[in-house]
């Protein structure tokens, strides 16, 4: 389950992805689905949730995945990270505006990737 912290920002980024084309939009939707259903196989559906909000990098998100404690039923932080946007021909060397590093070859497409 996704718990969206900033619905306006989410709509802005979804719109940005849609404007970037069908492939970009699908890439973002797939990553959001991945985070929203993470570990359903071994934790059981409804026993994980992902809080997702605005990151400081443009068109990117910060997230925290929680799992339900099987003994107490309380939500416990499991891990956190970012859903990071990479745009056309960007060098992902840690510099602005993305502030992230990637060993992948720069691309001419808009993509999002999960970083933990």
Image (spheres, grey):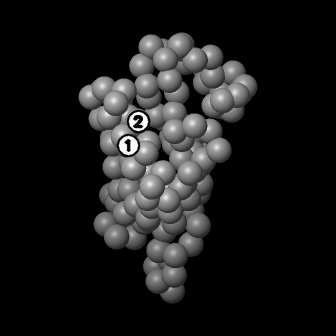
Q: Which residue is mark 1?
A: 14
The spot of residue 62 in percent (x, y) is 57, 50
> From what the image shows, is residue 73 above or below residue 66?
below
Q: Nearer the viewer, residue 22 or 43?
A: 22
Q: Nearer the viewer, residue 63 or 57?
A: 57
> From what the image shows, is residue 91 above or below residue 51?
above
The spot of residue 66 in percent (x, y) is 51, 66
Q: Which residue is mark 2?
A: 16
Farthest residue, direction right: 95
Q: Nearer the viewer, residue 40 or 93?
A: 93
Q: Secondary structure at mark 1?
A: helix
The spot of residue 17 in percent (x, y) is 38, 34
Residue 31 in sight here = no
Assess whether mark 2 and mark 1 are in contact (beta carbons under 8 angstroms).
Answer: yes
> From what the image shows, is residue 55 above or below residue 106?
below
Few, some or many C-alpha atoms within 10 Å of disc 2 (few <14, some 14-19, many ≥20)? some
Residue at (44%, 64%) from the top-left corner? 3
C-alpha distance separating marks 1 and 2: 5 Å
Please tell me the numbered disc located at residue 113: none
Q: Secondary structure at mark 2?
A: helix
Quadrant of image for the C terminus: top right
Residue at (51%, 33%) from the top-left corner? 85
């Amino acid at each position: 389950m996704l718990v969206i912290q900033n619905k306006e920002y989410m709509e802005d980024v979804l719109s940005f992805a849609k404007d970037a084309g069908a492939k970009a939009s699908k890439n973002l939707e797939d990553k959001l689905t991945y985070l929203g259903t993470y570990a359903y196989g071994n934790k059981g559906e409804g026993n994980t949730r992902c809080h997702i909000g605005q990151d400081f990098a443009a068109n990117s998100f910060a997230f925290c995945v929680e799992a339900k404690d099987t003994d107490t039923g309380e939500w416990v932080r499991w891990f956190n990270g970012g859903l990071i946007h990479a745009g056309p021909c960007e060098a992902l060397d840690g510099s602005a505006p993305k502030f992230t590093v990637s060993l992948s070859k720069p691309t001419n497409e808009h993509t999002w990737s999960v970083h933990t």
